[in-house]
């Protein structure tokens, strides 16, 4: 399945925002049932599988006791961490390939 950069970015936004929501909810010890949303919907949001409208986001933030800007700050940290982890994984993959290439070259000699 080929996805465009815009689709990949939207998926990354949903995942990072969902993670931020789950992080805040768990940190505050709030059960999903007490947030005024259907459990399956909130679970899908937290997994990054569905979008929230701005009114839903605003309501959710109020229930979590945070401003939307606080949630956005947490989201931005999650995005930065996710990008850093992906870069580290790419660097490690390149190192592994180089090491394998060097080993094959040494075996030929």
Image (cartoon, grey):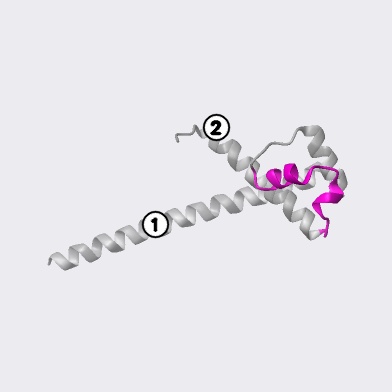
Q: Secondary structure at mark 2?
A: helix
Report the front residue among 5 and 49.
Answer: 49
Q: How many marks?
A: 2
Residue range highlighted in magenta:
28-48
The numbered disc on residue 19 is none
30 in magenta: yes
Please report the residue visible at 65 percent of the width from the left and 51 percent of the height from the top.
Answer: 78
109 relative position to 86: left or right: left
Q: Earlier in the sequence, mark 2 or mark 1?
A: 2
Please report the residue visible at 87 percent of the width from the left and 44 percent of the height from the top.
Answer: 62
Please report the residue visible at 77 percent of the width from the left and 54 percent of the height from the top.
Answer: 24
Screen quadrant of the N terminus: top left
Tell me the residue that label 1 is attached to. 93
Report the front residue among 27 and 70.
Answer: 27
21 in magenta: no
Q: Is residue 102 above or below residue 59?
A: below
Q: Is residue 4 above or below residue 71?
A: above
Q: Secondary structure at mark 1?
A: helix
Image spot of residue 63 (x, y percent):
87, 46
Image spot of residue 49 (x, y percent):
64, 41
The numbered disc on residue 6 is 2
Image spot of residue 51 (x, y percent):
69, 36
Please report the residue visible at 60 percent of the width from the left and 36 percent of the height from the top.
Answer: 10
61 relative position to 86: left or right: right
Mark 2 neighbour class, 10 Å CA radius: few under 14, some 14 to 19, many 20 or more:
few
Q: Is residue 8 above or below residue 80?
A: above
Q: Based on the displayed image, in which of its 4 quarters is residue 44 positioned?
A: top right
């Amino acid at each position: 399945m080929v996805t465009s950069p815009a689709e990949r970015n939207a998926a990354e936004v949903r995942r990072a925002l969902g993670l931020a929501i789950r992080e805040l909810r768990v940190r505050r010890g709030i059960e999903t049932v007490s947030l005024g949303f259907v459990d399956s919907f909130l679970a899908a949001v937290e997994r990054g599988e569905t979008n929230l409208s701005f009114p839903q986001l605003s309501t959710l933030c109020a229930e979590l006791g945070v401003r939307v800007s606080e949630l956005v700050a947490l989201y931005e940290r999650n995005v930065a961490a996710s990008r850093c982890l992906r870069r580290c994984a790419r660097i490690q993959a390149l190192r592994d390939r180089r090491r394998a290439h060097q080993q094959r070259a040494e075996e030929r000699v």
